[in-house]
Amino acid sequence: MNPIRELAARLRQARQVLVLTGAGISAESGIATFRDAQSGLWSRFRPEDLATPEAFRRDPALVWRWYAWRREQVAQAQPNAAHRALVDIAQRVPTTLVTQNVDDLHQRAGSPDVIALHGSIARTICSVTKLNIDADWLAAHPGEPPRSPHHADGLARPGVVWFGENLPPDALDRAEAAARACDVVLAIGTSALVYPAAGLPGTAQRNGAWFAEINPQATPLTPTADLAVAQAAGTAMPAVLAAWEEYA
Ligand code: APR
C-alpha cells in the first residue's frame, strides 16, 4: 500500500491521535526552520547561539532584535495546507496537537487547543519573574529591550523556552499524557534532536501506538517509525485527507 493511503487508513481507524510538529511544518509558510540556514542579516548567527539565556544576558539587544525579526516573519506568514489539514483531521478523529514551534500558525489555521511546548513568540515576559508583559505596556515603553515592569533587575524578554530552560510543566504533562493515551502518533517536520519533545513518539510507541514520521529528510527517529513518509508536510497531509475520502 502506498504510504499516504496507509497513513490515511491508520488515521481513519485511530481512537486517539497525537501529532507532534516542528519547524518543518511552517517551512512552506516561508518561516526558516531552526536548522536551515537563516536568511539575510541573521545568516551569520546560529539559532542555537541566540536562543539561550546566556546570549540574552550577554547581549539582550541582539537577542531582542532577532526575535523582533522572527516575529515579523511570522506576522507575514500564513498557515499552509499542512496546518489546515491537521485542523480537518482533528475534526474527524480525537487529536492532541503538540508543537515545538513558537509561531502561531496552528492557532491561526484553526487548531482549537495547541500545546505549545516551547512557548510563543507572541508572548513577552519578565526575565526575572517570568510574568507576562502585555503588548499595550510594550507599545508605551519602547526599548531594545525595555526594562521589566515586574522587577527592578528584570528586562522584557520573549516568552519562549530557551536552550537549557524548563518547559512549561503543565504543557509537558499534557503532552506526555497524550503520548501515553494515543494509538497513533505523527511526527511532522521535526529533526527530533531536542528532548523532551523528541521523546514523545517513543513514549507513545512504548504504550502501543503506531508511529508515522512526515519529513523529507531522515531523522534519528526514522529507523523507529512504523511508517516514514519522505515528503513535505504541505504535500503529504492534504494527500492523506484526499486518500481518506476514498475510504469514506
Ligand atoms: N515538511 C516537513 N518537514 C520539513 C519541511 C517540510 N516542508 N521542510 C523541512 N522539514 C524538516 C527538516 O528536514 C527538519 O528535519 O523539518 C525539520 C526542521 O528541524 P529543525 O529546524 O531542527 O526544527 P525543530 O525540529 O522544530 O527543532 C526543535 O529545537 O532549536 C530548538 O526549540 C527549538 O523548537 C525547536 C527545537
Image (cartoon, rainbow, N blue to C red):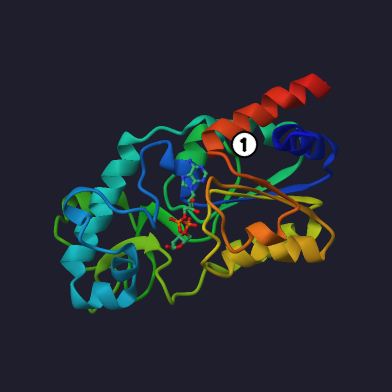
Looking at the image, which residue sits at the far left? 143
Can you identify the residue that label 1 sits on? 86
> Image point 55% across, 61% down: which residue?
192
Q: How far across and how far down the image is residue 226, in percent?
A: 76, 52
Please say if 110 is above or below 59.
Answer: above
How far across and how far down the image is residue 163, in percent?
41, 72
Left or right: where 187 falls relative to 225: left
Q: Quadrant of the N terminus?
A: top right
Three-letter code, disc 1: Leu
Query: Horizontal and vertical percent for residue 174?
Result: 67, 61
Is any part of residue 174 visible from this angle? no
In the depicted structure, whether residue 55 falls above or below residue 176: below
Apparent side of residue 243 relative to residue 40 in the rendered image (left or right): right
Residue 73 location (% of width, % of height): 30, 42
| Residue drawn at the location 40% of the way across and 51% of the way down | 33
User: Residue 164, relative to residue 178: is it above or below?
Assistant: below
| Viewer-proximal residue among 178 and 4 | 4
Regarding residue 102, the answer to whether it shows in the image is: yes
Please tell me which residue lies in front, 208 or 115.
208
Left or right of 36, for residue 5: right
Q: How many callouts does the rendering have?
A: 1
Location of residue 236 (image quadrant)? top right
Residue at x 74%, y 38% (from the top left corner): 7
